[in-house]
Amino acid sequence: QVQLVESGGGLVQPGGSLRLSCAASGNIFSINAMAWYRQAPGKQRELVAIIFSGGRPNYTDSVKGRFTISRDDAKNTVWLQMNSLKPEDTAAYCCNAVITEVGGYARTYWGKGTLVTVSS
C-alpha cells in the first residue's frame, strides 16, 4: 500500500517561515508528480505548488517568490519551503502525488494534511 505522510505544520508569526515535508512509502516504481494543495475554512481547495519528474516546479501566483517546492527521488520525498508567510496562507496543507506502483499503473494519492496557522 502506498502512503503519504506529511509533517512540519504549526503556528508561525507573519513574516516567518515553515518547511513542510511529505514522504511517500510503499511498493513504488516511480513518482510522476508531487504537489501541495491547501484549503482554508470556507474556501475552495487550491493547488499551491507542483513539481514533476523532470524537476520543473509550478506555483500559484499568490506564493511565487515566497514558496519553493523541491523533491528527492531517492527518498520519495517532497518539501515545501514557505518564507515571508502571511495570514492568508493559513490553511490545511495536503500532499498529493501521482505514483506508479511496481506491477501497477499511475494513480493519485493524498496525505491526511498538516495545519499551518499564520498569526500574531
Image: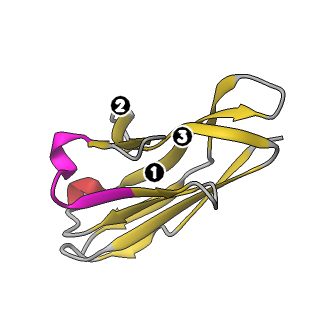
Numbered circle sitting on residue 44: 2
Neighbours of disc 2 within 10 Å: few (<14), some (14-19), many (20+): few
Circle 2 or circle 3, nearest the eye: 3
Q: Quadrant of residue 51?
A: top left
Question: Residues at badges 3 and 1 in contact (C-beta under 8 Å)?
Answer: no
The residue at the point 63 percent across, 59 percent down is 74
Where does label 1 land, which residue? 93
Q: Which residues are magenta?
A: 59-69
Identify which amino acid the numbered label 3 is placed on: Asn
Q: Residue at x 84, y 27 (%)?
A: 103
Tell me, for residue 96, which label it has, or none: 3
In the foreground, 2 or 17: 2
Magenta stretch encompasses residue 65 = yes
The kind of residue on which mark 2 rests is Gln
Comes first in the chain, label 2 or label 1: 2
Question: In this image, 85 relative to 93: left or right?
Answer: left
Using the image, determine if residue 91 lies above or below residue 75.
Answer: above
The residue positioned 21% from the left and 51% from the top of the image is: 63
